Amino acid sequence: MYFISTIFAAAGYIIHTVIWLYTWIIIVSAVLSWVNPDPYNPIVRTLRALTEPVLWRARRALPFLYVNGIDLSPVAIILGLQFADIVLTRSLGYLAIQTMVP
């Protein structure tokens, strides 16, 4: 019974870490878009490859996120990630607690 509880707790921690890391990747990508870096730089290419598919879908689904020349899709994605982080980690934490109770 404690093994399943540990699996739920570990899954919640891993999900939280992945969401936290991806949030920072989106922030760095957004900041880099302000300075227009070299598009052939491998770091810039990697960041774009990780973020553009998600940002493109957000721009397509929510076209009003582009206001007065400012792209707000990173903000929308970060808010969505934070919501998912809270829901998933708390749900898995609750499951971990419930499986510990005999």
Image (cartoon, rainbow, N blue to C red):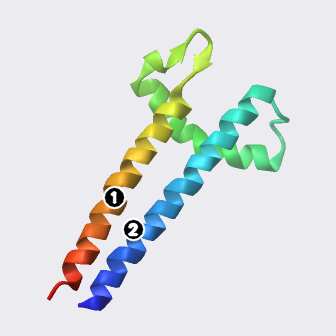
Quadrant where the C terminus lies? bottom left
Q: Is residue 4 left or right of residue 58?
A: left
Residue 98, placed above or below residue 88? below
**For numbered disc 1, what is the local secondary structure?**
helix
Q: How far apart in space, not on screen, are marks 1 and 2 (Cα)?
A: 7 Å
Q: Position of residue 90 (x, y in %)?
A: 32, 61
Residue 62, placed above or below residue 6? above
**Which residue is the site of mark 2?**
12
> 55 or 87: which is nearer to us?
87
Q: Quadrant of residue 11?
A: bottom left
- Within 10 Å of the Cα at label 1, are there few (<14), some (14-19), or many (20+) other Cα atoms? some
Q: Position of residue 18 (x, y in %)?
A: 52, 60
> 16 or 22: which is nearer to us?
16
Tell me which residue sits at (75%, 35%) in the image. Answer: 32
Whether pointer 1 and pointer 2 mark residues with C-beta atoms closer than 8 Å, the reply is yes
**Which residue is the site of mark 1?**
88
> Which amino acid lies under the numbered mark 2 shown in the image of this protein?
Gly
Q: Name the outermost residue toward the top.
A: 68
